[in-house]
Amino acid sequence: MTSCIPTADAPEPLCAVAIHQAVSRGETRAVAVLEQALARIATVDGAVHAWTEVDRDAALAAACAIDAGERRSGLLAGVPLAVKDIFRAAGTRTTFGSPIFRDAPPDAEDADCVAAARAAQAVVLGKTVSTEFAYFTPGPTANPWDTGHTPGGSSSGSAAAVASGMVPLAIGSQTAGSLIRPASYCGVFGLKATYGRYSLRGTRDFSRSLDTLGWMARSADDLELMRCALAGEAYAPLPVPQAGGLRLGYWDTFEAEALDAGGRAAFETAVARCGAAGIHLEAVALPGTLRGLAEAQKTVMAYEACRALAPEYENHRDLMGPALVQLVETGLGIGDAAYAAAQALAEQGRAAAADLLRHVDALLVPAAPGEAPAGLAATGDPVFSRVWTLLGQPCVSVPGLFGPNGLPIGTQLVGRWQQDRALLAAAARLRQALAA
């Protein structure tokens, strides 16, 4: 077992909030923060392989400009940021994890999320590995907890870069389980924002009804700092609810049979620790008539992806992975009526989820079947994220539990539509309970 997780004999990686505060007050320099990040990359990325490209020169120029400027008060001032290799970032190459684009020219402009982060004075360090077109075919990234295991996908490099202490923040995306699953496997916080809340301009559609922006960090407050930067809001620390003031509905979901023994034990432990911490718990469930939501997500994704990937399928099929080819061909066989039926079921699901969330602050559900599977040939099963991605609810994976092999298992919270800050406050309280 090779582990690349920061230990007591290595400098503790700074969190994004601490960097923002120290750089803004002139207590540290953005260049010093960057140098620490680059040193960490040099130490561990040879084993983790989180990056497709580290743009040291551009990052150094950005850090120097922050240190030299009169304004160092941006919410992300001096914070090293990793960007998933499906989002454009000026001066770097976007390959979408595909050999089709391996010789693409450097990007001329930023994706909207990258531009917003730069405007908040983030130091964009480079691109992190994505699976092929953010689907299933993995890149070379390994899980920092044990490099013989997958980090999950499709935001593989983003999760691994944060977990191994190379950066405090990383941008990712989710269409099925591409943020929540790798966050769970790598033991970090991961937020899938409310669907449609943040612009995806500067990437490309995979499934326009499902694609959602998100990001990863080592604390809920760091997720909130990034949320404020992207939303153009003033940052304030998360209000951590008092134990009796937080109400969670818990449910192992329609897909409960996908939990392995470690995943089942972790979910039951999460429920027990919440109860012990004084968090109000209520058993809940969506109506049984919505049992087909996970299959509806697959239908919507395949129908839309085959259209989005039509140019690559027609012209470069030989350079596409078998799983992606199969998805496109599955989508070509889905008729308009089946797609409409899946979307209609999703609408029913949104109404039912909103009804559940009128009575509780968030839903406590599994994040992944268990620990990260062994091997790097696959990225695990997104089964516990499909429904919530289809419904568009904000979701966050909260670390703090471990499986029988000592690898992380996250716990997922699902929040109310457009109430991402409130969800992150609940996540901060949950993390306290899990650590108790």
Image: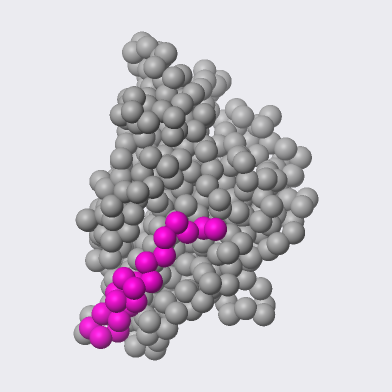
Q: Is residue 327 magenta?
A: no
| Picture layout, residue 380 above or below residue 288 | below
In this picture, residue 392 sits left or right of residue 379: left
Residue 431 makes an appearance in the image: no
Does 261 sit above or below residue 166? above
Percent of width and height locating residue 67? 30, 84
- Which residue is drawn at the image coordinates 47% and 52% (left, top)? 129
x and y percentages locating residue 99 in the rendered image: 42, 42
Q: Nearer the viewer, residue 6 or 351?
A: 6
Q: Main secondary structure of the magenta part?
A: helix
Whether residue 68 is visible to the viewer of this picture, yes or no, is: yes
Stretch of the chain drawn in magenta = 49-69
Is 51 part of what is drawn in magenta?
Answer: yes
User: Which sits in the foreground, 141 or 119?
Assistant: 141
Q: Residue at x 43, y 70 (%)?
A: 16
133 relative position to 159: left or right: left
Q: Quadrant of residue 96?
A: top left
186 vs 85, left or right, is right
Q: Is residue 121 left or right of residue 212?
A: left
For the point 28% across and 65% down, the residue is 118
Q: Position of residue 377 (x, y in %)?
A: 62, 41
Q: Is residue 133 above or below residue 74?
A: above
Residue depicted at x 28% and y 56%:
106
Between 231 and 308, the residue placed more toward the observer is 308
Image quadrant for the N terminus? bottom right
